[in-house]
Amino acid sequence: MQNLLQRDLGSSLLSIAIILGLLGLFSVFLRIFTISIKKILESIFKKT
């Protein structure tokens, strides 16, 4: 029974870590995307 509980705890911690990692990667990509869009818009409006 203890092995089962420990395995469930380990798998739940692993899934939580994976979810947090994916959220971190998503926020980093979103930040890069918004910065690039901002630079593109700035270059478009500087030319006119």
Image: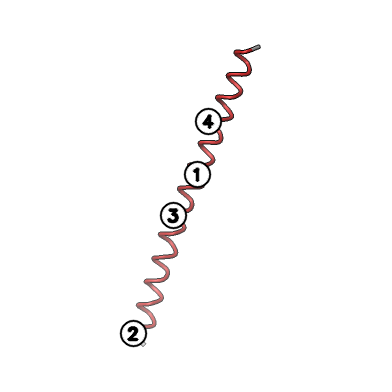
In the rendered image, residue 46, in percent from the top left (x then y), is placed at 34, 83
**Of the pair 3 and 25, the residue shown nearer to us:** 3
In the rendered image, residue 15, in percent from the top left (x then y), is placed at 55, 33
Q: Residue furthest bottom?
A: 48
Q: Which residue is found at the position 59% from the left and 29% from the top?
A: 12
State the residue position of label 1: 22
State the residue position of label 3: 29
Of callouts 2 and 1, the N-terminal one: 1
Q: Which residue is found at the position 58% from the left and 18% from the top?
A: 6
**Which disc is residue 47 wearing?**
2
Give the class, few, some or many, for how many residues have Cα within 10 Å of label 3's Cα (few <14, many ≥20): few
Q: CA distance from mark 2 to mark 3?
A: 27 Å
Q: Amino acid at mark 4?
A: Leu
Q: Amino acid at mark 3?
A: Phe
Dots 2, 1 in contact, CB < 8 A: no
State the residue position of label 4: 14
Q: CA distance from mark 1 to mark 4?
A: 12 Å
**Of the pair 24 and 46, the residue shown nearer to us:** 24
In the rendered image, residue 47, in percent from the top left (x then y), is placed at 33, 84
Give the class, few, some or many, for how many residues have Cα within 10 Å of label 2's Cα (few <14, many ≥20): few
